[in-house]
Image (cartoon, helix red, strand yellow):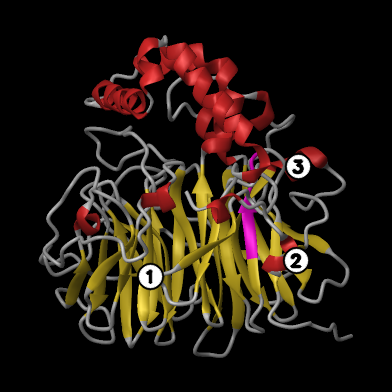
Amino acid sequence: MNPELHKAFDAALSNFRKITPVNGFDAANPDNAMQNNYAWSMTELGDYIYVGTARNIPYSIFSNQIFGDIPIPEELTPENPVLRGEIWRRRKCGQYGWERVYRTPENLVDLGFRFMITYTTPGGETAIYAGALTLSPNLFMVKSTDGVNWRVLENDIQGFSTRYMAEHRGKLYMGALPITGLAGIQLYSSFDPERDGWELVDVNGDPDKNPRGNVDLLLSYNNHLYVGTGLPTGFELWRTLGPEPQKDRWKLVVDKGAGDARNEHPWSLAVFNNYIYIGTAIEAAVLSLNPEQRIVPPKGFDVIRVDRFDNWELVVGGPPIVPTLPVTGIRGLPLSGYHSGFGNISNAYCWQLQRQGNELYLGTFSWSVLIPPFIPLLPDILRSLLSINVKGYQTSQLEYLKYLLQADPRFAHLPLEDVLQWIADFITKLGRRTLGFDLWKTTDGIHWEPVSLNGLGNPHNYGVRMLFLSQNGSLYLGTANPFDGLEVWVKPKNIIGCTN
């Protein structure tokens, strides 16, 4: 491996600086601050940057027994769990620090605000629209025109959350999602969500001429609306044939996970140097959309790019885990030379892609730092996992264990418990230099260099959940950190002064 990849994070060289003196924002309540563990969404309005938080994500996943009856490590368990999303803001110039401007009402249980956007209606009203992930199948969204006073937008949409909204030709588009698994496509549009409500976009036509799957991403580009969808056979990317969405007037641009069915979700995208870059993911690293095989072995993410003529090519990715035969193109060798996850299997998501100036930034989710806390609980975890009655699950786990044994011959002569302990000890010894998310950048989309391989110096930062480019050119980075609470960093384009 290139020795350069082992370097520790240097804030001065990166030009990123941390702007959250207290992780999770809440200096008055450390337990509440720890529960603000994802910077799940970002937007701006006037002089302020806004962050919508996710609450207790790993704790909620394990307490709801999505992986079975697995005990939860103490490090991930809050003293007083409160599932009520929060929105915080800070002046871009840094004056006055962070303040909480909204908290979900007590009568609603939600995991936080998954997406926020600032949108101006044709009538000239500019407002923030923030969509939450609830534990009931009714979409919950709030709106504010001043960032302080918020009101709930009534709707009858059956969806647990929205992961993405985008403005296209003056209209706001949104995808509604199930809480987990696969559902029928739900794409909505509105000129004014509060006054007009949301209209369901009709894609109920020829399945070969309309988007299908979960709406993960939306993009307005080159006078077309693009929709990225999650499917168990691999993600797809569609675009409108004309400027507006019309039934049976869509083109399939990428299909079958770009040659690997394990690329189920397109969870990040950005336009850079006239290419659309797309990063893939498997939900929670091991949760498949396939109802016949809900848990699968982990793999690193892939990155592809699409040119203006709808041709796609692999940028980051190795030999496919579950090979497919896309009708839209052929999976070749990675342009960057890097295999999936930049060669790191724990890089499960390419979670964010964002351009700043002549650089494209890529942030990952890496699950390796979660292994040490679970080591003392492994006997109970193994019993729980091996009792899961899911078709194909035990087979996939055995195949993965065989992969580990082949990776190092010493494993073949050790009991399974010793193998897992050895892996955990090895990961722990890597220490602050490699645990935590990766942040990479490129100036040409092909040659990449690491900005940080250890969560910006904090290995508990296991994900870059947000990369947001403000109108003044500053790049904001929000982390996912289930141990300490989220962090927010900024890479300014220039020095910003406050106005009174």
Q: Secondary structure at mark 1?
A: strand
Is 355 magenta? The answer is no
Magenta region's main secondary structure?
strand
Across and down, in percent, residue 419 comes to 45, 18
Q: Secondary structure at mark 2?
A: helix
Q: Quadrant of residue 338?
A: bottom left
Nearer the camera: disc 1 or disc 3? 1
Gap between marks 1 and 2 measured at Cα: 28 Å
Q: Earlier in the sequence, mark 1 or mark 2?
A: 2
Q: Amino acid at mark 3?
A: Asn
| Residues shaded magenta | 477-482
Disc ID at residue 277: 1
Query: Which residue, given by chain and number where applicable, does mark 3 sit on?
Result: 32
Q: Amino acid at mark 2?
A: Ala
Task: Tell whether label 3 touches label 1 (CB within 8 Å).
Answer: no
Q: Amino acid at mark 1?
A: Tyr
Residue 229 shows up from this direction = yes
Across and down, in percent, residue 216 comes to 38, 59
- Residue 416, placed above or below residue 264: above
Q: Secondary structure at mark 3?
A: helix
Nearer the camera: disc 2 or disc 3? 2
Query: Which residue, given by chain and number where applicable, does mark 2 sit on?
Result: 12
Nearer the camera: disc 1 or disc 2? 2
Residue at 59% x, 27% y is 372
Q: Nearer the viewer, residue 448 or 258?
A: 448
- Residue 285, placed above or below residue 260: above
Crowding at label 3, few (<14), some or many (≥20) Cα neighbours within 10 Å?
A: many
Task: Tell whether label 3 touches label 2 (CB within 8 Å).
Answer: no
Left or right: 365, with 337 as reference point: right
Left or right: 458, with 239 as reference point: right
Is 479 magenta? The answer is yes
Gap between marks 2 and 3 measured at Cα: 31 Å
